[in-house]
């Protein structure tokens, strides 16, 4: 995998997010489809959310406002948010 801090590749970003969410939630990476609901179906609580955010900040070299995570409903929403933040960073 390339260095996501230096370049923005949507597919690599999606894979990195899947790996981090999978490790923290202990859910198989193949179950992390776009339509799957973060809280209701994956059971990701606020503590897990904070850990996901911290790992993504480190992996991506960006600061993520935790309040943005509250508006995320699905795995696809999460990808879209991270993609938008990375685009803003590379600006």
Image (tube, helix red, strand yellow):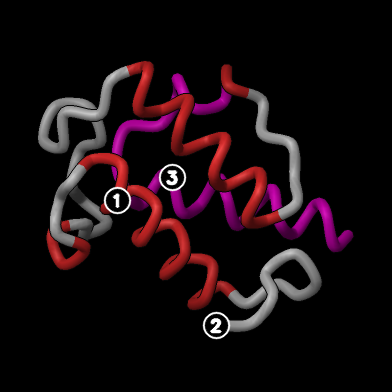
Pick whichever, 18 or 33, lies toward us.
18
Residue 11 sits above or below residue 42 on the image: below
Left/right placement of residue 60 relative to residue 67 reads: right
For residue 23, the mark is 1
Question: Which segment is the magenta one?
Answer: 68-91
Q: Residue 57 at what x, y percent from top left?
A: 65, 43
Whether 33 is drawn above or below 40: the answer is: below
Q: Is residue 3 above or below residue 64?
A: below
Numbered badge on residue 12: none
Numbered disc 3: secondary structure: helix
Question: Which residue is the extreme one toward the right?
Answer: 91
Q: Position of residue 16 (x, y in %)?
A: 47, 64
Question: Residue 27 placed where, x, y %?
Answer: 15, 50
Residue at 53% from the left image edge and 35% from the top image edge: 53
Q: Residue at x 43, y 45 (%)?
A: 78
- Determine whether 48 is above or below 55 in the image: above
Q: Quadrant of residue 49?
A: top left
Within-10-Å neighbours for mark 1: few <14, some 14–19, many 20+? few
SS at mark 1 in the image:
helix
- Label 3 vs label 1: CA separation? 16 Å
Question: In the rendered structure, does residue 19 fall within the stretch colored magenta?
Answer: no
Residue 25 is drawn in which quadrant?
A: top left
Q: Residue at x 11, y 35 (%)?
A: 41
Around disc 2, counting alpha carbons within 10 Å, would you say few (fewer than 14), some (14 to 19), or many (20 or more)?
few
The residue that label 3 is drawn on is 78
Circle 2: element type: loop
| Left or right: 26 in relation to 34 | left
For marks 2 and 3, the one nearer the N-term is: 2
Which disc, if any, is residue 1?
2
Tell us which disc is closer to us: 2 or 3. 2
Q: Quadrant of the N terminus?
A: bottom right
Q: Earlier in the sequence, mark 3 or mark 1?
A: 1
């Amino acid at each position: 995998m390339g260095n996501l801090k230096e370049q923005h590749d949507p597919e690599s970003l999606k894979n990195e997010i899947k790996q981090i969410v999978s490790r923290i939630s202990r859910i198989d990476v193949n179950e992390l489809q776009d339509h799957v609901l973060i809280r209701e179906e994956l059971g990701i609580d606020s503590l897990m959310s904070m850990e996901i955010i911290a790992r993504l900040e480190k992996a991506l070299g960006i600061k993520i406002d935790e309040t943005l995570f509250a508006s995320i409903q699905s795995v696809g929403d999460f990808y879209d948010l991270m993609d938008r933040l990375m685009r803003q960073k590379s600006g």
